[in-house]
Structure formats: structure tokens, C-alpha cells
């Protein structure tokens, strides 16, 4: 296969060299009589060889046709080579044809985005279906017990995982939304340019820090701190990993997310609106609370939904900060677990793709994907509509 | 200047200078504006007339790089005194902007916004009364009375601008500043607003910035002509338009500059 | 109406101004909280991790007794390999005990306990040296060897006399002796290059664990991401921004890309596991699969920033090119793309930085495995980037799961390394943006 790929490549390069000469010869040696520049003839031949070859290569390896793939590539490459050389006449619009090939490449690249989504859906639907053929969907969605057992007879109810996910996300948002929003308001409405130029990048640094770093922070610093100074003295338990630990750290992670989205949205509220309010003798805070925020509200709601989607899908912070015990409890200082934690724990280590204990991860993944998809699309639609309103 | 004018003046300014970061926008402007009259500021664009208008209710405070020096007094009180709260000042000196900018709230709430924040009404009935009175004064009551709770942004451009005027009136100001209030309106809406301005001068002293000389001639009693940050000429509107003293004013009026 | 002076604030205004001040204070408070969180996070990581870049070594002379290492005396490697690290451990013990005696240090420790002060890795180090160079058997050779994690921790302040008293793996006496050996220059704490180059080490020897394999794996993945994501992302952006008709279809692609940017990263891990490993049979744990998964994850980021960069090129440039008879394609490739290049590069670097720090999807494709062999970029069996590897952020996670507290230091040290890489990448992005920023 790699041999025929190299051959196809060689054929393309050969075409790139011969085609211009052939074209000039066809025009009786006068390049000005051609419908396109000589090198555009070369480019056209090169692309006519390579584009179909690569298309076959990708399609073939996706379909798993190993043996004949090499021949197919060679045949297609040769057809492209011969065809494009045969077509050369002085009137042949080589540039237009070459550009069609390029456009095809561009389209193919943008289709990859679609294919990714298709791939995600496929990979999960396929295995999740296997899971539901072995495990009753009612037990999965409605059972409050999660106790996988690799010898079989597991209880795989999603409810305690969902509870942990939502509880942690809720705490994270309770923490991040007011702080992020107030930070955005302060930076866009009050702060001096100097302070903005320092504080804004500093907050953005928080956004650039990988989540594993937050996870370690939860594990090493925040967890033990909360346990020693809050949970243990107040009698809430003695676990370092807890809903509170993960929630707070995730909240810190979300601050820059909320604040930069809100900042954009607040800045999109026209200045004339603020002037109108200030001109009536409103103070800045009255203007913000009663005019700017209501005007920006849809956008802010969208931002919060996006933040929620991110919180629900976050993995490393909860893996290291929340614990592994599936539990339905209200005590925020107790260790609980989330959908993402269980996806990781069921799919790492020894996995057996025939057992429901492994396959459940795909059902969990699908649930997670559907929830975040709904939140994302809703949020994107709200934000989009909001932007259009002030454009 | 004569003494009588001094005592009558609602607003008096002396040697006002305004600097932006590195431009000198207003150069030594002194002017006396009388109560219960319409005063028009005219001049080519960029001449500083809007900047000067925004000094009168300290809206320029909201621009970081803007520095105002000199003396601006309203009823003899220096409005740039450290003891003056711009919030109180702006309740007394209302403003209407170039582009109608109703808040994304109902018509009622738009008008009630000012009285609410300044605490002008003791109860709902009083607030209702203020809203009705303001809308009536702004000649919008008949059109809006049946849809008070629908959003202010749903009105037509001219109606929106009258709503903004009603909103400004509702805080019971003594002075009304208007920054090219008709520039975004069609001729019919413009005529309605101009008619309204005529009405308003009975209760307020109105200062209007306009780029239209015809409008200045139609609505104002006094006119000030600004050019490149200088106050070139100030006097009775009739006189400015028929017999200007300064050659620059004459060039502008006759259309040679601007 | 009664005349109210502007010079005196009324009660209501005072109240409103107080509310204003409070509101402003909340805003400032929010920023302070965010800054504090950042400071706390960085301090926590740096204070636990910076010591990973220092390491305590013991310089001792080890008697490589022929009777123990090569009874046959033939220097035959096959025979010599039969001596395991346990055999070497005894020699090392002799070496260090001799060193203690020669210095005349008083201690109540048994020879066994003194020997334990060296890392378990030390025996392997000596063994490898001997096997690589059998001639040295029979002589005494000076080695620079790792001390064990507790002794190392003592010199970095992590282990104290109090904690040692409660610790089954060490004792205050050992620490006292270690201090004396350090005073005598036998134990020396130096910069730990091995942390950046050595491979991972097993559970009981955190002092030997390094990031070499992880850095290599991350590097391979970044190469894959750069080579795939940049051209595909740019091509897709050019189509969507310059050529695509505005219809339902492109609308779907657009929403789809925005959604992909917000899909939880772990979902990409599931995709990688199901499609690339289970279906397309790529090697598990390989940088190739990791790179492919990260490519798909990074694409939306690159597409979004590239489209913004293309959009910021004013239409007049396109018109000018079309006006002199260039085709649409030529106007894009000759004029628009070069002008948008700095923006595209900045977006790409930020996307790469994001990919470098991503952990969750890599866990699912098996990169959390214990790998001690440096992966080759290409091998005949495994293909391009096909050999098992791990990655920087995954190594961090891996170390957090180990029992020995020495690994917490290693994990934080790995994070410092990761953050330094990210810092460099972002600095380059900022530099590019500053240097080529254009205002139209």
C-alpha cells in the first residue's frame, strides 16, 4: 500500500513537470496562446492524480479494504494522470480545473467537522446498544444503585452518578457565576485601563491552565484544607475528596470562562443605552443593574449554560477531587462520584468489551454527550440571537 | 456683557477648556444661557458643540481621557465643585441623545425609571401620574396610553425619541440638553419633535445641538456658532442668521464652510 | 418647586452613593478572589513541585567483588546477567557502610538499615554499568547513586524528624546519619536533570521517576496535531469563510463546529477508543492515536480562530485582487491568507497548548500505562508514532495514583514542567500577535 502511495506521489510530480511542457508544445511553443499559465497545467495534473488517490486511501482504510487498496490507488492515480495530460489543448482552462480540485480539498476539510460528530455518535450508539442488549435500560436510567462487580451481577444505575455530577456542577456555578460576572462588570465598567491590562490577562491565565493542574490542586491542597478546617471540626465527615472540594476547584476553573463570555456580552450592550441612563442621573451601579444587565440577560444566561455544560463534562478535577464512591447524599463534604469519573474508571485498566461493566461507559458517555449537546445548542442559539439583536 | 443678562442666566460658563488625550476640543468658551428659552449650538461637525453640551451635565465624566477646566455655573453654583454629585446634577439637567435609546423595558418603565431611582414618587399612584404627565408633555400619551406595558423598542423612531424626551422630563429637570435629537429621524418625526421643543421651552431652558441651520432657525431664540473648538459668535438667532458679525459665521451660514 | 442646591447632597443621594460604593466593592472583591485563587494555585504547585528539580545523590565507592558478580571469571554476559539486583544491593550496602566507617561516624543503625538509605534504583544503575562494561568487575568504582525517597525528602524539607519517627520506611537515626554524610560531602543535593530525561519508575522508587518518556510522547503527539490540525483547520476555515454559500447546510456545519468546541473532552476519548483502537486497530497507548484524538479536539479551536483571522482581513483587499483579474481562489491564497497568517498561527499555538494539557481522553486510549522504554518515532512493527508511550499530563495523573508521598512532589514537578511549556507557547503566541498586529 505504501509502495503504491509513493508511486502515486511520483506520478503526480512527474505530471507536474510534463504537463506544462506538453501545454507549451500544444500551443506551438508560445505560452501566451494558452488559456492558463503553464504551471497551472502542471498543478492541475498534480491534483488530478493526488486528490482521487488520497480519497480512495481514506475511504478504503475506513472501510477496511486492505488488500486491493494499493491497486485501486494506482489505477485511480493513473486515470487522473493520463486523463489530465490527454485533455491538454491551448484552450483547456487548466486554472479553473485546478481550482475545482482545490475547492474539493477545502470542502473535504470542512466535512471532517461533520464526520467527527458522526464518529462520536456512532462510537457511542454502537457500543451503548450492545450494553442495552445485556442490561435493561430501565435499570440503567432509573436505578439508584451503582455497584459494578466484575464477576457479573452488577447494579449499574446512573442516578447516583448524575446526582454527583449535578451537585458538583451546581456548587461550581454558585461559586463561579457571581465572581465571574462581578469581575467582568468591574473590568468593563469600572476599572482603569491600567488595572484592566493587568487583571484581565491574569484571569485569562486561569483559563489556560490544564484541568489536571486543578485536579492536583484539589487533591493536594484544597481537599485536605477543607477536611481539616471545615468538615472534620464541624462533624461533616473526614474525607478530603468531596463534592465541596471538586465544586470549589471547578468553580475557580470556570471563573475566567464566565467572566470572558460575560465581558463580551456586556460590551455588546450599546454605549448609548448607558448614556441614556447616566443622563437621567442614575449612578453607575443603577445603570448596570437596571439597564445593562437586563439588556445583556439572554447572553449571560447563554454563558451560564455553556459554563454548566463545561462543568458537567469536566473530568480530571472530579477524578482527583470528588472521590469514587457512588452515593446519593446531601452532605457536600462527603465523597461522591460523577458520570465522567465512572467513564474513566470503567474504561481504564483491564477492559472486556463484552461485559456490561465495560460497555456501561458508552451508555454513560452517550448520556453525557446528549446532556451537554442540549445545553450547548440552547446556549449557542441564545447567544447568537442576542448578538444579532445588537448588530 | 450687561448685568441684567448675568442675573437672568440659568447657565453661565467662563473660560471653559476641554482636552481629550491630546486634542484641545474646547478653547476658552464663555457663554450665558437664559432660562425658558431655546438655545441652539450650531457649527460644522467636530467643532466641539456636542462636547460642550456634555459638559453642562458632566456626561464627559464618563470618558476617561476627558479633562474639563474653567467655570460652569448653574444658578450660580459651580457644577464642577467637588461637593457636587453628578448624579444629582443630571437629575436637574436632563439629556436627550442623538440616537433614540429607549431601554429594553416597557414604555411605562422607561418613563418611570428616572422618578424611581431619584425617589420622586411616594406611591404607585403618584408614579402613574408622573408617567402620564411626562408622556403628555412629550406628546406621546395618545399614541402610547394603550400600550404602556409593551416594550419601548417597539415604537417607531420618532415615537422612540419622544419617549426618550418623556423619560428625561419625568425626573423634573430644569434644563433639557438635546444632542442632535432629530438627526436619526425622518422629516415628519422631526417636525413633531420640533413642535414639542417649542412647547417645552415654556417649562424648561432647552439647549439643543443641531447640524441643521434651518432647524436652529426654526426652534431657537438664541444661537451659538462653534468653529474648531471656539465659540465664534453668540446672540439672537435672528441676528446670527441675517446679520452675523464674524466672517466665519457668515461663511458657514452661506454654506462656504462646514 | 423648591430650590435645591447642588452643593449639598441629600439623604437619598448619599444612600445611593453608598450602594454604588458597595457594588463597586463587590466587583473588586470578585477580582481579588480570582487573583487569590490563581496565586494560591500557583504557589501550591510550585511549593510542592519545585523540589522535584533537585535530587540527593550519594557518591560512594562500590567494591565490585568478582566472587559475587562473576564467579566463573569469564566475563561472559549471559552468566553475569544471572546476578540480579539483589546481589548488587549487598555490594552497595558494603560500599556505604565502609564510607560511614571511614568517616568515623557513630550510628546505632544496622548495616541493613544503612544500605536502605540508597534507592532501590541504585542497584539497577550499578548493574547496568557493570553489564555494559564487564571489565570493571574486581575493582572498586566510585558511583553517583540515588538515595532513597525519604532521605531525598529530608534534604528537601518534606521529611522531618517528627514525621520519620512515625514512618515505617525510615527513622530519625537514618536522617541523623544522612545529615552527617551530607556534612561530609558524601550526600550531595544537585539539580535533577534525570527528572526531565529518565523514564518512569515503579511504585517504590519515586526518586528515580522521570519525565523522559512523557515529554517524548507529548512531543510526538504535538507533531501529529500540528501536521494534521493546521492544514485541515485552515482549509476548512477558508471554505466556510470564503467559498461556502450561506444556506442551511453551512449553518449546520457552523453550529456543529461551535458544539464540537464545547463537547466534553472525555467524549473524544471514547471516540478514539471506539473508532481508532477498536475499529481501525491502531496501537493502544500510541502517540499516533493520542495525536489523532487531540487533532479532532483542537480542530474546532483552530477553525474558530482562523475564521476570525480571515474575517478581519477587510473586503477591500479581496476586491482589489479580483479587480486586477485574479480568480477568487487566487485572491484568497495570494492576499487574504498571508494577511491572516499571524492570527492563524496565534490560534494554532493556543490550540496546541490546549492539546498539550489535555488529559481525560488520553486516559481512555491507554496512555496511562506504565512505560519505561523510550518510544521510537518510527518502527517497522508499530509504524509511525506507534510505540506505547505516555504524555506529560497523563504522567501527572499516573503519579497522583501512587501510594508513596514522594510521587506527589514528582506530580507537581511534572506540572511545573508542563506549565513552563505552556508559558513558552503562549509567550510565542503573544509575541506573534504583538509583532504582526495590524490595524485596518
Image (cartoon, coloured by chain):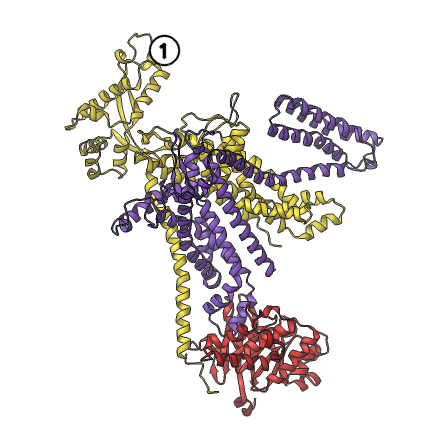
Chain colours: A purple, B red, C yellow
Residue A317 seen in this snapshot = no
Residue C257 at what x, y percent from top left?
Answer: 58, 45
In-front residue for pair C401/B201: C401
Question: In the displayed structure, would residue B54 be above or below residue A293?
Answer: below
Q: Is residue A313 left or right of residue C148?
A: right
Which quadrant of the figure has residue A391? Answer: bottom right
Residue C32 at what x, y percent from top left?
Answer: 38, 57
Residue A165 at what x, y percent from top left?
Answer: 42, 46
Question: In the displayed structure, would residue C154 be above or below residue B27?
Answer: above
Residue C395 seen in this snapshot = yes
Question: In the displayed structure, would residue C201 be above or below residue A228?
Answer: above
Quick one: SS at disc 1? Answer: helix
Tally the numbered discs: 1
Q: Chain of mark 1?
A: C
Residue at which label 1 appears:
C78
Q: Residue furthest right?
A: A28
Q: Is residue C271 left or right of residue C80?
A: right
Amino acid at each position: 500500500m505504501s509502495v503504491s502511495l509513493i508511486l502515486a506521489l511520483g506520478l503526480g510530480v512527474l505530471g507536474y513537470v510534463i504537463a506544462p511542457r506538453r501545454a507549451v508544445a500544444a500551443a506551438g511553443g508560445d505560452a501566451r496562446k494558452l488559456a492558463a499559465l503553464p504551471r497551472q497545467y502542471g498543478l492541475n495534473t498534480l491534483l488530478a492524480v493526488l486528490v482521487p488517490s488520497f480519497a480512495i486511501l481514506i475511504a478504503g482504510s475506513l472501510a477496511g479494504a486492505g488488500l486491493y487498496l494499493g491497486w485501486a490507488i494506482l489505477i485511480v492515480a493513473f486515470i487522473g494522470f493520463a486523463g489530465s495530460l490527454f485533455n491538454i489543448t491551448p484552450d483547456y482552462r487548466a486554472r479553473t480545473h485546478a481550482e475545482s480540485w482545490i475547492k474539493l480539498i477545502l470542502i473535504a476539510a470542512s466535512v471532517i467537522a461533520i464526520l467527527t460528530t458522526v464518529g462520536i455518535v456512532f462510537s457511542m450508539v454502537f457500543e451503548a446498544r450492545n450494553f442495552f442488549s445485556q442490561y435493561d435500560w430501565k435499570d440503567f436510567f432509573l436505578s439508584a444503585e451503582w455497584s459494578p462487580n466484575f464477576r457479573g451481577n452488577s447494579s449499574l444505575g446512573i442516578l447516583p452518578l448524575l446526582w454527583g455530577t449535578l451537585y458538583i456542577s451546581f456548587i461550581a456555578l454558585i461559586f463561579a457565576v457571581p465572581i465571574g460576572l462581578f469581575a467582568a462588570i468591574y473590568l468593563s465598567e469600572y476599572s482603569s485601563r491600567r488595572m484592566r491590562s493587568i487583571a484581565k490577562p491574569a484571569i485569562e491565565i486561569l483559563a489556560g491552565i490544564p484541568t489536571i493542574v486543578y485536579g492536583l490542586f484539589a487533591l493536594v491542597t484544597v481537599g485536605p484544607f477543607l477536611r481539616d478546617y471545615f468538615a472534620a471540626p464541624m462533624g461533616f465527615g473526614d474525607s478530603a475528596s468531596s463534592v465541596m472540594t471538586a465544586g470549589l476547584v471547578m468553580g475557580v476553573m470556570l471563573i475566567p470562562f464566565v467572566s470572558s463570555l460575560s465581558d463580551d456580552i456586556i460590551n455588546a450592550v450599546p454605549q448609548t443605552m448607558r448614556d441614556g441612563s447616566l443622563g437621567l442621573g442614575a449612578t453607575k451601579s443603577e445603570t448596570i443593574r437596571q439597564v445593562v444587565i437586563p439588556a445583556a440577560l439572554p447572553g449571560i444566561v447563554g454563558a451560564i449554560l455553556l459554563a454548566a455544560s463545561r462543568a458537567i463534562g469536566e473530568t480530571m478535577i472530579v477524578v482527583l477531587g470528588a472521590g469514587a464512591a457512588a452515593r446519593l447524599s446531601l452532605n457536600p463534604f462527603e465523597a461522591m462520584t460523577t458520570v465522567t469519573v465512572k467513564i474513566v474508571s470503567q474504561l481504564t485498566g483491564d477492559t472486556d468489551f463484552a461485559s456490561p461493566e465495560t460497555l456501561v461507559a458508552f451508555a454513560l458517555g452517550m448520556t453525557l454527550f446528549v446532556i451537554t449537546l442540549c445545553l450547548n445548542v440552547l446556549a449557542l442559539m441564545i447567544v447568537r440571537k442576542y448578538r444579532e439583536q445588537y448588530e | 456683557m450687561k448685568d441684567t443678562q448675568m442675573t437672568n442666566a440659568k447657565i453661565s460658563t467662563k473660560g471653559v477648556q476641554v482636552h481629550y488625550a491630546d486634542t484641545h476640543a474646547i478653547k476658552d468658551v464663555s457663554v450665558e444661557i437664559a432660562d425658558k428659552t431655546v438655545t441652539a449650538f450650531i457649527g460644522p461637525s467636530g467643532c466641539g458643540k456636542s462636547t460642550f453640551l456634555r459638559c453642562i451635565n458632566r456626561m464627559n465624566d464618563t470618558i476617561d481621557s476627558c479633562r474639563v477646566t474653567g467655570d460652569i455655573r448653574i444658578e450660580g453654583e459651580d457644577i464642577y465643585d467637588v461637593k457636587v454629585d453628578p448624579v444629582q446634577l443630571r437629575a436637574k439637567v436632563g439629556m436627550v441623545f442623538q440616537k433614540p435609546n429607549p431601554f429594553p423595558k416597557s414604555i411605562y418603565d422607561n418613563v418611570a425609571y428616572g422618578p424611581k431611582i431619584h425617589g420622586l414618587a411616594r406611591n404607585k399612584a403618584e408614579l402613574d401620574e408622573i408617567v402620564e404627565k411626562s408622556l403628555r408633555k412629550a406628546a406621546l400619551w395618545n399614541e402610547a396610553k394603550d400600550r404602556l406595558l409593551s416594550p419601548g423598542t417597539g415604537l417607531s423612531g420618532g415615537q422612540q425619541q419622544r419617549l426618550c424626551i418623556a423619560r428625561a422630563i419625568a425626573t423634573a429637570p430644569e434644563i433639557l440638553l438635546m444632542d442632535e435629537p432629530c438627526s436619526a429621524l425622518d422629516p415628519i418625526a422631526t417636525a413633531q419633535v420640533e413642535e414639542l421643543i417649542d412647547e417645552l421651552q415654556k417649562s424648561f431652558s432647552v439647549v439643543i445641538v443641531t447640524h441643521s441651520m434651518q432647524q436652529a432657525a426654526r426652534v431657537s431664540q438664541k444661537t451659538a456658532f462653534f468653529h474648531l473648538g471656539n465659540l465664534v459668535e453668540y446672540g439672537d438667532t435672528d441676528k446670527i442668521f441675517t446679520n452675523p458679525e464674524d466672517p466665519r459665521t457668515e461663511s458657514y451660514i452661506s454654506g462656504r464652510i462646514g | 418647586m423648591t430650590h435645591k442646591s447642588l452643593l449639598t447632597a441629600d439623604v437619598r443621594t448619599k444612600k445611593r452613593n453608598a450602594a454604588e460604593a458597595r457594588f463597586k466593592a463587590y466587583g473588586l472583591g470578585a477580582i481579588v478572589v480570582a487573583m487569590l485563587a490563581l496565586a494560591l494555585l500557583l504557589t501550591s504547585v510550585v511549593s510542592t513541585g519545585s523540589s522535584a528539580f533537585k535530587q540527593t545523590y550519594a557518591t560512594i565507592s562500590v567494591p565490585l567483588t568478582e566472587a559475587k558478580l562473576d564467579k566463573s571469571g569469564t566475563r561472559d554476559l549471559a552468566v553475569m546477567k544471572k546476578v540480579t539486583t539483589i546481589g548488587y544491593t549487598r555490594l552497595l550496602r558494603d560500599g556505604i557502610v565502609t564510607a560511614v566507617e571511614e568517616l568515623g561516624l557513630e550510628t546505632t543503625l544496622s548495616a541493613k538499615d544503612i544500605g536502605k538509605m540508597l534507592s532501590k534504583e541504585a542497584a539497577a544503575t550499578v548493574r547496568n554499568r557493570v553489564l555494559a562494561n564487564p571489565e570493571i568487575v574486581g575493582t572498586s568504582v566510585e558511583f553517583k547513586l540515588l538515595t532513597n525517597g525519604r532521605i531525598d525528602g529530608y534534604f528537601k524539607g518534606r521529611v522531618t524528624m517528627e514525621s520519620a519517627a512515625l514512618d515505617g520506611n525510615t527513622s530519625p537515626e537514618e536522617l541523623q546519619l544522612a545529615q552527617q554524610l551530607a556534612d561530609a560531602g558524601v550526600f550531595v543535593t544537585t539539580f535533577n536533570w534525570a527528572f526531565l530525561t529518565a523514564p518512569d519508575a515503579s511504585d517504590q522508587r519515586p526518586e528515580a521517576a522521570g519525565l523522559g518518556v512523557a515529554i517524548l510522547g507529548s512531543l510526538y503527539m504535538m507533531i501529529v496535531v500540528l501536521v494534521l490540525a493546521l492544514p485541515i483547520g485552515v482549509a476548512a476555515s477558508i471554505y466556510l469563510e470564503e467559498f461556502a454559500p450561506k444556506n442551511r447546510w453551512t449553518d449546520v456545519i457552523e453550529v456543529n463546529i461551535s458544539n464540537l468546541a464545547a463537547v466534553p473532552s472525555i467524549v473524544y476519548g471514547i471516540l478514539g477508543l471506539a473508532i481508532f483502537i477498536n475499529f481501525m486497530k491502531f496501537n493502544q497507548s500510541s502517540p499516533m492515536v493520542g495525536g489523532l484524538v487531540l487533532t479532532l479536539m483542537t480542530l474546532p479551536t483552530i477553525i474558530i480562530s482562523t475564521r476570525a483571522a480571515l474575517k478581519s482581513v477587510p473586503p477591500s483587499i479581496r476586491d482589489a485582487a479580483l479587480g486586477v483579474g485574479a480568480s477568487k481562489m487566487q485572491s484568497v491564497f495570494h492576499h487574504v491568507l498571508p494577511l491572516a497568517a499571524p492570527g492563524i498561527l496565534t490560534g494554532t499555538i493556543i490550540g496546541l497548548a490546549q492539546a498539550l494539557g489535555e488529559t481525560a481522553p488520553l486516559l481512555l486510549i491507554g496512555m496511562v500505562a506504565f512505560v519505561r522504554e523510550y518510544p521510537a518515532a518510527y518502527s517497522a512493527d508499530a509504524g509511525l508514532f506507534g510505540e506505547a508511550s505516555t504524555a506529560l499530563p497523563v504522567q501527572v495523573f499516573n503519579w497522583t495514583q501512587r501510594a508513596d508521598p514522594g510521587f506527589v512532589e514528582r506530580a507537581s514537578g511534572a506540572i511545573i514542567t508542563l506549565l513552563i511549556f505552556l508559558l513558552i507557547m503562549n509567550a510565542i503566541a503573544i509575541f506573534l500577535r504583538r509583532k504582526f498586529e495590524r490595524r485596518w
